Amino acid sequence: MYSEDDLLMISALQHLLFCPRQCALIHLEQIWTENRLTAEGRLLHEHVHEAGSDSRGAVRIEYDMPLRSLRLGLSGRADVVEMQRQPDKTWQPFPVEYKHGKPKKDDSDLVQLCAQALCLEEMLGCAVPAGAFYYGVKKRRTEVAFDQRLRRVTEEAAARLHELLSGTITPQPEYSKRCESCSLIDTCLPQTSGRRGRVSNYMERMTAL
């Protein structure tokens, strides 16, 4: 169990799985730069969070709901949590995360949503078997089942996040195609990573002569 002082942001899990260096630049070095994609995503979340709360028949809707898990050492806010009334009169939490773009090929979005579910389970003492994304590009919901594999990946990611951010070393850059969509590309300079390595090897060879 972690203490309140140890809690890290749920959103940092997505940064970690996208790129550990990006995660360290943002959360260790406190570096942040917006591009068009991040600005549009921020505006979408701000619009959702302005809505407050609502009730629609057998569904109560909470916007911008605070979340916390001492077991995982995470805290954050859910865009939307739908409390769905069940036949036995209990309420079933159903987290919904809003994303500006489209579904990603990796687990970064899935882990962020699953972490919200694990927080809800700990806070409310009930199972949260599923949630959903609303992607702006697709204009419809994509439902996600929180199966054992995703739960395990999420718990492992939370542990890796604490390990990374408990240190002081930012990982070295490694260029890939995803770098082109990162708002920190001009700070990170991933294209120079191989070049620096070649220069370093050359200097080592020269000093060994």
Image: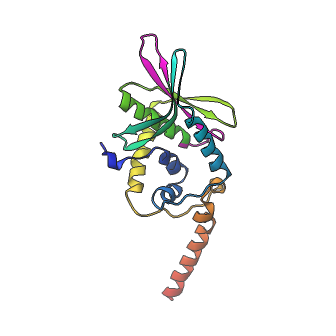
Residue 104 in magenta stretch = yes
Task: Tell me which segment is drawn in magenta.
Answer: 83-108
In-front residue for pair 93/148: 93
In the rendered image of this protein, does residue 58 appear above or below residue 167? above
Percent coordinates x, y for residue 141 in the rendering: 62, 29
Q: Which residue lies furthest to the bottom in this view?
A: 209
In the rendered image of this protein, does residue 38 appear above or below residue 61? below
Percent coordinates x, y for residue 81 in the rendering: 50, 29
Q: Residue at x 58, y 77 (%)?
A: 199
Residue 103 in magenta stretch = yes
Q: Residue at x 51, y 60 (%)?
A: 25
Percent coordinates x, y for residue 193 in the rendering: 58, 68
Q: Which residue is drawn at 57% across and 36% down?
A: 50
Quarter where residue 126 is shown: top left
In the rendered image of this protein, does residue 91 appear above or below residue 112? above
Quarter where residue 189 is shown: bottom right
In-front residue for pair 1/82: 82
